Image: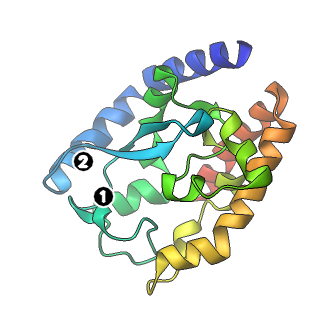
């Protein structure tokens, strides 16, 4: 209950304080290429229930039909999208997912259903809590696009990254608490500041 109250308060505060930035980014996305401002993708929520995650659209329309993982020089990403992704600004609309109750500010990053449907053993713990905007894995893999090659990004993600991310997601679920959430929020802000 306390976590949910914190999530709602943080999301409202974030939306209010960042409203000029959100508006500016919305206009930039709209002017950069044809299509909607927001991208909505299906992810696994708490207990594996699917929900629509919101992000500022950073790719050309129709690009989500390709690989689920983007690579370093992915041609599907728009010029504005590259900037949004570099500073993780494309994730800000997830504050609305937090308000809707789909997500938490801190929690295991939500994953595609094709991966969560294959979870076994301890990996199922990941789905016991609401997914979050940030966690250990999003901090450690904040430069994920730079780690993934262009040839077969999905395969590289599945073989080189997914298991490591899941270990960090499980770590969060086992150690979760209010103080840890505050630490992860602070670490996330520091990491984003260093991306400049």
| Residue on which disc 1 sits | 80
The residue lying furthest to the bottom in this view is 151
Residue drawn at x 19%, y 56% as measured from the top left:
32
| Residue on which disc 2 sits | 28
SS at mark 2? helix
Compared with 75, 69 (above or below) is above
Q: Is residue 196 visible?
A: no
Front residue of 194/129: it is 129
> How far apart are labels 1 and 2 at the CA level?
7 Å
The residue lying furthest to the right in this view is 175
Compared with 136, 61 (above or below) is below
The residue lying furthest to the left in this view is 34
State the quadrant of the N terminus: top right
Q: Can you tell which mark lies on residue 92?
A: none
SS at mark 1? helix
In the rendered structure, the answer to whether residue 123 lies left or right of residue 111 reads right
In the rendered structure, the answer to whether residue 164 lies left or right of residue 83 reads right
Q: Is residue 34 visible?
A: yes
Percent from the top left, x then y, of residue 98?
A: 52, 27
Do callouts 1 and 2 mark residues in contact (Cβ within 8 Å)? yes
Residue drawn at x 49%, y 73% as measured from the top left:
154
Number of numbered discs on residues: 2
Percent from the top left, x then y, of residue 53?
A: 43, 40
């Amino acid at each position: 209950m306390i976590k949910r109250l914190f999530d709602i308060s943080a999301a409202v505060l974030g939306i209010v304080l960042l409203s000029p930035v959100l508006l500016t980014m919305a206009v930039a996305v709209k002017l950069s290429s044809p299509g909607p401002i927001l991208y909505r993708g299906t992810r696994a929520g708490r207990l594996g229930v699917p929900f629509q995650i919101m992000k500022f659209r950073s790719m050309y329309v129709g690009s989500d039909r390709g690989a689920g993982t983007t690579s370093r020089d992915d041609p599907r990403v728009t010029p504005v999208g590259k900037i949004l992704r570099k500073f993780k600004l494309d994730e800000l609309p997830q504050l609305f997912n937090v308000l809707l109750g789909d997500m938490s500010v801190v929690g295991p990053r939500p994953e595609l259903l094709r991966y969560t449907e294959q979870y076994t053993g301890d990996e199922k713990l990941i789905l016991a809590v609401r997914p979050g905007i940030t966690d250990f894995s999003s901090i450690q893999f904040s430069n994920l696009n730079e780690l993934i090659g262009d040839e077969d990004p999905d395969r590289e993600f599945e073989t080189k990254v997914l298991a490591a991310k899941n270990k960090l997601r499980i770590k969060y679920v086992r150690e979760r608490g209010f103080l840890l959430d505050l630490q992860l929020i602070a670490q996330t802000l520091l990491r984003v500041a260093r991306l400049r």
